[in-house]
Every structure is written in C-alpha cells, then in structure tokens.
Amino acid sequence: MVNYLVEEGHWGIYKNIENMPLERFDSFRTIINEFNTKVGHITQFSLIRGNRPFEHNNDKDEIFHSPKDDSFCKVVEGTLPAVLLSKDSEKVEDALSINSAKSKLTDHRAISIVNLFTPMARVLYDNVQQITSIRDKSVGIGLVHLLTNHYDTLTEVPIEEVEKLLFTTRLAQKNSISELKAKYNTEKLTLLHFFNIGEEAGASICHLHSQTYIYANEIGHGWTSLGFLSVPGFHKKLKNNMNYCLACELSKGDRKIIDPIGQDLLLNERTVFENDEWLVVTAFSPERDGQLRLFPKRHVSQFIYLDDKQITDLAEVMVIANKALDNFIKGTNPSMHLLQDRNILFRQDNVGYESGMHLIIDIIPIQRIGGAEIMETYRIATMFPEDVAAIMRESLKEVK
C-alpha cells in the first residue's frame, strides 16, 4: 500500500521545510578536525520525537517489562503499518521507500523497519525537493531492528535469534548506506548503532530492539566520536608503524600488552570470555562500573563488514556478556547504584573516513553519576575492572 497521506514527519517524510529536524553546534565546543568535519557538542531538534509512545509496565517491581501488545508487537502482528526494509536476511523495501503497509511477520525471527519517529528527514516532497542547501537540516535514515518474538533483554534471547537480528541489521544498514550515498552524491556518512535496554537507558519501548541513525549531510561528530576516529592515527605516529592497531594487538592473545601511552592493560586479568572471533573484557578505564568491551579478533572497521562467522560468534558473546553483567549487578552493593538497564554502543569508523579504527562494542550499565563527571570526560569508579572480571568469570561457570 502506497501512503501519500502520511502525517508530516512520520517515517521521516516531510513536505514543509519549516518542520524538518535541524542541528546546532555549541560554538564554544566545536572545532574542525583532521577529516575536515565539525566536531563538538551537537543538539538536534526534532519536534516529532516528542510524539513517540512510551510503553512501559507501570509496576515498578517488574524489571525490563513492556506490554505484550506494544507497538512493535502490533507491527509484527500486522495491525500497525510499517516501512519494512528487511526480514531475516531478505530485503523487502528500498531504504527511501514511501510504502507503508500492514504485514503479518510472525513467520520470521527478525525485521528492520524505518523508525516511525525518526529524528531526521528521510524523504523530501514538493518544494522541499528543490532545496539546494540543507546543511543545517538533519537528513538521513533512522532504522529500528527488532525480534518478532517478545523479549525485554538480550539475556532472555536464544543465541540463534540474536544471530537473526544481527543479520537483518547488517542487510538494512548496507542497503541504506548505498542509497544515501547515491541520493546525496557523497562518500561520507555518519553512522550510529546502539541498543537502549530498559527505561532508564532511554528505551521508549522496552521490547528488545536496536537502532541505527545514518546522517547524510555531514552532521559532524561529538567529542567521543572524535577520539575513536582520531586515536588510531595518533597511535600509528607514536609507534612509527602505519599498520599498528591496539585492538589487533589485544586480540593476538599476548597477555602482556603495553598501550602506546605506556599503560599496562592487564589483559589477562580483565578477560571475561572469548570465542573464535571475539574477545570480551572489562573496560580498562570504565565509563560505568561493570562496563564490558567486545573486540572482533580480526580487524574490521564497521559492523557491515563483519562476515557470517563473525556475526554468528558475535551473537554468542553478546548473550554471554550480558549474562555476566546481569550476574555482576545482582551481586553489587546497592550503594553502587547500578541498574539492570544498559546501553550497547557500536563504536565504528564512519562511512568514507577510513580512520583505521577497529570496531568496538561497549556494554554500559546505567549508574548514577555526579556533577564533576558530567562536567568532564571523567569517571570515579569504585571497583577495579580486574576484580569485576574475576566476579564475572566465576558467575559464568553457572550459566554456560
């Protein structure tokens, strides 16, 4: 069903330029980096985001619970329309499609759809199509990747279903990147891929899902992204070796690793789990107590470049890593203020940058932080990551 009467902004479809999302940089915190891209604090204004539903169980004694008839369930059952981009490993619609339809999807395990309340303009109509400069507007694609079965946490999900979710995500991202590059005649795209698990982690619907934001108009980067993009080149210069990669060194299995700025990374003490393709460690300098970091053992810069074996093994380590974090949090002192809610962040090279960075996946639990920590890229931790890793390794003996 072709839907030309869609409400303004739904699925990123806009007719009126005044309604389009836009971006602003903080003038006191913005520079131009070595990639000739703005870097600083970015605020994105998207009026439609205020209309998205918040579907949580009202019983605060329940952890990670969302209604069994939430909006995602209705999409899967075919009672709510969606712009369906992929189901399992099968492409359905183009990423810039305007075709919204109701489709019963219960025979599939995972789907990728366009975010109904995406914070960027995806399709432009009428007079908006004629705009030659949209530099201050947010233009791109917002995706949602979800399982057709209802789960609230990764810990609950069978590994084979996580695998299906990752495969449909990879397919939808690849197709979206290709279409945006062609539409906007650009080789550079900013890509953000993440899970928000739990209400305190920012999930408006707790039904397990991940999201991808792909920006096509050089939105720029925040300071965190600047570090991940700039550090590989800095390391190469320090080591006087253009092939040097710290993550690759960690993945070799050499347990005595000194980083380029002279720190002993204590890899053996921090390792929680590994399989053929992935290494799971506690973060050496954690943003929150219990933070886990996942590395592919083979050098890969972006999620879309993971091969099938890496995807399959990633499904296993994501489930096991989340179980280890669950167990750790359950055993912590309440004064640590650790919640079961968490964010999973895919740190990767942006499209067209070729910074040399190695894909990293951070699993970060929600924890109360103070003013000094908000003021600076800074964290006061209460446990050494080596001790956290020892607790997690012990807990995994009971769940494998």
Image (cartoon, grey):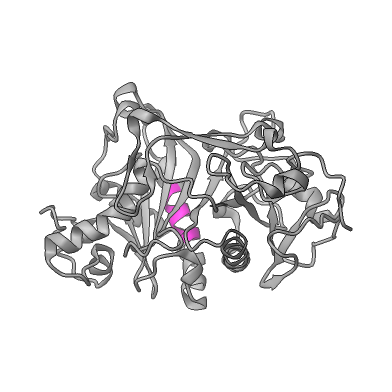
Q: Nearer the viewer, residue 114 or 220?
A: 220
Residue displayed at 43% across by 58% down:
350
**Residue 335: x percent and y percent?**
36, 26
Question: What predominant SS class does the magenta segment belong to?
Answer: helix
Q: Is residue 56 visible?
A: no
Q: Nearer the viewer, residue 90 or 288?
A: 90
Above/below status of 177 relative to 42: below
**Residue 345: x percent and y percent?**
45, 50
Q: Is residue 5 visible?
A: yes
Residue displayed at 57% across by 45% down:
133
- 340 falls in the magenta region: no
**Residue 126: x percent and y percent?**
78, 47
Could you tell me how many numbered marks the image carries? 0
The N terminus: image quadrant: bottom right
Q: Name which quarter of the figure residue 273 lies in.
A: bottom left
Residue displayed at 83% across by 51% down:
81
Q: Name which quarter of the figure residue 337 lies in.
A: top left
Q: Nearer the viewer, residue 114 or 120?
A: 120
Q: Which residues are magenta?
A: 318-325
Residue displayed at 37% across by 38% down:
40
Residue lying at the far top in this picture: please name it.
371
Above/below status of 251 relative to 16: below
**Residue 329: x percent and y percent?**
42, 41
